[in-house]
Image (cartoon, grey):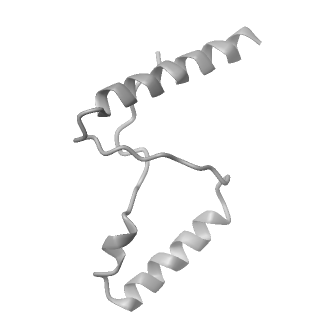
Amino acid sequence: MIKFEPNKFLVVNRKHLKTIPTWKCQVVALALKFISDHVPENKYYVCNQDEPYAEKVIAMILKGESIKASNKTAD
C-alpha cells in the first residue's frame, strides 16, 4: 500500500534565503551544487499542508502512485 512519507523532501522558499548571511548562503549553494550532481533531475510542484485543498492534493498523488505501482507489478 502506498503511504504519504512525511519529511521525504526539504523545501526552502527562496525568499527566506535573503535573510541568511551571505557566507551561509554560499554554503547552502555549495551543498545544493553537490546534491544536484548526484541526484536525477526531477521537477516538483509544492503544496503547503495547511492549504484547504492539501488533503485533495495528497489523495490524488497517492492514487497516482498506487496506479503507477500496480502498472509496474503487471509488467
- Which residue ends up furthest to the top in the rendered image? 74
- Which residue ends up furthest to the front in the rendered image? 52
Q: Residue placed at 38% from the left, 29% from the top? A: 58
Q: Position of residue 35 (x, y in %)?
A: 58, 65
Q: Residue placed at 32% from the left, 88% from the top? A: 21
Q: Residue placed at 31% from the left, 82% from the top? A: 20
Placement of 3 over or under 37, stated as above or below: above
- Which residue ends up furthest to the right in the rendered image? 75
Q: Position of residue 38 (x, y in %)?
A: 66, 60
Placement of 63 over or under 31, stated as above or below: above
52 vs 71, left or right, is left
Q: Residue placed at 54% from the left, 24% from the top? A: 65
Quarter of the figure with the C terminus: top right
73 vs 56, left or right, is right
35, 71: nearer the viewer = 71
Placement of 17 over or under 56, stated as above or below: below
Placement of 61 over or under 29, stated as above or below: above
Would you identify the image quadrant in which residue 59 lies?
top left
Please count the marks in the image.
Answer: 0
19 vs 24, left or right, is left
Q: Position of residue 55 (x, y in %)?
A: 30, 28
